[in-house]
Image (cartoon, rainbow, N blue to C red):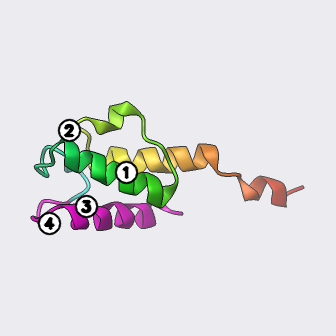
């Protein structure tokens, strides 16, 4: 899954939680989006299910930008999913 697909998935989940979607952009933090701790938990729970990842506690802070959430998903997926390209070369 590429960065664009993950970004779209994050934005889609935010769209379910937020009433005001006009503030959703890559550099926005949870605080910028007026998300309280319950909203953050709902979002991260949905993203954990959607992308099969588990977020570290540092991502749960209100100052976390969406780019960090997306980067974290990419990094965790890269570390935990098998790399088919390595086995293809054998």
In-image side of 10 versus 49 (left or right): left
Q: Are marks 3 and 4 in contact (CB under 8 Å)?
A: yes
> In which quadrant will I find the C terminus?
bottom right
Residues at marks 3 and 4, CA–CA distance in whole angstroms: 8 Å
Q: Is residue 50 shown left or right of residue 26?
A: right
Whether residue 70 is visible to the viewer of this picture, yes or no, is: yes
Circle 4 residues within 10 Å: few <14, some 14–19, many ≥20:
few
Residue plotted at (26% across, 40% down): 64
Q: CA distance from mark 3 to mark 1?
A: 12 Å
Disc on the earlier residue, 3 or 4: 3
Specify the label residue 62 is tagged with: 2
**Which of the marked residues, 4 or 1, is nearer the chain's N terminus?**
4
Disc 1 designates what residue? 45
Identify the magenta region. Answer: 1-24
Q: Disc 1 and disc 2: Cα gap in Å?
A: 15 Å
Query: Which numbered tag is attached to residue 14?
Result: 3
Residue 18 as seen in the image, left or right of residue 1? left
- Counting residues from the start of the chain, the first of labels 1 and 2 encountered is 1
Task: Give the vertical position of 8 relative to 86 (above or below).
Answer: below
In percent of the image, x 45 and y 60: which residue is there?
50
- Indicate which label's residue lies in the foreground, 4 or 1: 1
Q: Is residue 75 left or right of residue 30?
A: right
Q: Rounded to the nearest whole Å, what is the CA distance between mark 4 and mark 2? A: 17 Å
Residue plotted at (21% across, 59% down):
25
- State which tag comes first along the sequence, 4 or 2: 4
Pointers 3 and 1 in contact (C-beta within 8 Å): no
Under circle 2, the secondary element is loop
Question: Is disc 1 surrounded by few (<14), some (14 to 19) or many (20+) residues within 10 Å?
Answer: some
Q: Nearer the viewer, residue 83 or 57?
A: 57
Q: Which mark is residue 30?
A: none
């Amino acid at each position: 899954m590429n960065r664009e697909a993950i970004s779209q998935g994050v934005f889609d989940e935010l769209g379910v939680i937020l009433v005001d979607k006009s503030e959703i952009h890559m550099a926005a933090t949870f605080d910028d989006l007026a998300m309280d701790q319950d909203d953050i938990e709902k979002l991260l729970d949905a993203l954990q299910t959607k992308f099969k990842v588990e977020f570290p506690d540092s991502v749960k802070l209100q100052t976390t930008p969406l780019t960090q959430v997306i980067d974290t998903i990419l990094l965790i997926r890269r570390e935990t999913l098998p790399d088919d390209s390595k086995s293809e070369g054998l």
